[in-house]
Image (cartoon, rainbow, N blue to C red):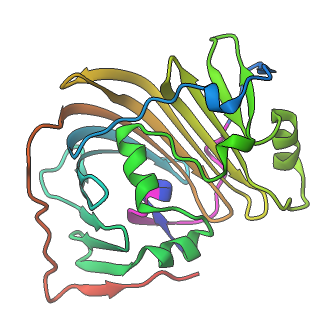
Amino acid sequence: MKKLLPILAGLMIAATFACKTSKNVIEVKDQVKPTGQDPSTIKMNEVSIDWFDGKFNAEIINDGKKNSVKGRVRIRKDSLIWISIKPDVAIIEVFRVLISPDSIQLVDYLNKKVFMDKVSAIKDFINYDISFQMVQNIFIGNPSSILDISTFKTFTNRENDEILASSDFDTYKEARGSKQPANYLFQALWFFNGVHKRNLMYDPSNKIEMDLQYLQHEMVDSILLPKTGQLTVIGDSSNTRFTFDYTKITTREIFEFPFSIPESYERMYLKK
């Protein structure tokens, strides 16, 4: 057991120690074809809400081991993300996380430990430029781009999705199979009638791949939001799949972000 891994993969919710594994696999089965369309003409709907409160059931597969959990996420737009996690069959809360644009705090109630650091420390640890905005977008369904979309190529598939990709898919697949690290990033975004369906990102230089898929959407307070989704993160030290299903979402209430750290809890640190 060598490294601290995030329970929500790249979401920085550290929950378990695990060894290197390759149980989860990211696949692109689409038969995509280029369209030559101007990237700026692709419709991309943006969810705009000031408050978000979502209860969810989730399944986490890490190192080939499956765990079911229940959770709750609260978001104040561009300010705070609060997450609570507990086992599916237990009443006792296991983790509570508070993320701001600059910092992250995690309380491990099971082991009586606490983690506190800057978001930049997480970036350095996982070798990936994750941000508060990216985490926020994952929960509410907005697309996140790590590259300049104006330089992307456009594609479509059999489902008539509109796809934006930083390069052609053959180049991406070749990079995945190569033992020589490449010096570029790959990203692809899927949309259908403007609705964000998938975000695939691959960093060949660090061999880190993240795949976020929204499997179902629903109308909540006249806003189309994700209902179910799946996030997979694969790297040299992480291999985690997080599948979630929102059971209740509220966007029209102002709420609090209860968070406290018991004085007796031991401090945790990231270790390479």
Residue 151 falls inside the magenta stretch:
no
Above-or-below relation of 210 to 116: above
Residue shown at 91%/61% (left/top)?
A: 180
Residue 13 position in % (x across, y down): 38, 62
Q: Position of residue 76 (x, y in %)?
A: 22, 54
Above or below, comparing residue 242 to residue 163 in the picture: below
In the image: residue 90, left or right of residue 233: left
Is residue 45 among the parts visible in the rendering? yes
On the rendered image, what quadrant is the N terminus found in?
bottom right
Instruction: Report the quarter where the C terminus lies.
Output: bottom right
Q: Is residue 8 visible?
A: no
The span shown in magenta is: 11-26
Position of residue 203 in the picture relative to residue 132 (left or right): right
Please identify the dominant SS of the magenta region: loop
List x then y, in percent, for residue 38: 72, 28
Quick check: 159 left or right of 228?
Answer: right
Nearer the observer, 39 or 64: 39
Residue plotted at (29% across, 71% down) = 106
227 vs 84, nearest the viewer: 227
Q: How many marks?
A: 0
Is 34 above or below relative to 48?
above
Q: Residue at point 86% right, 59% down?
A: 182
**Quarter of image, res 129:** bottom right
Q: Is 116 on the left-hand or right-hand side of 158?
A: left
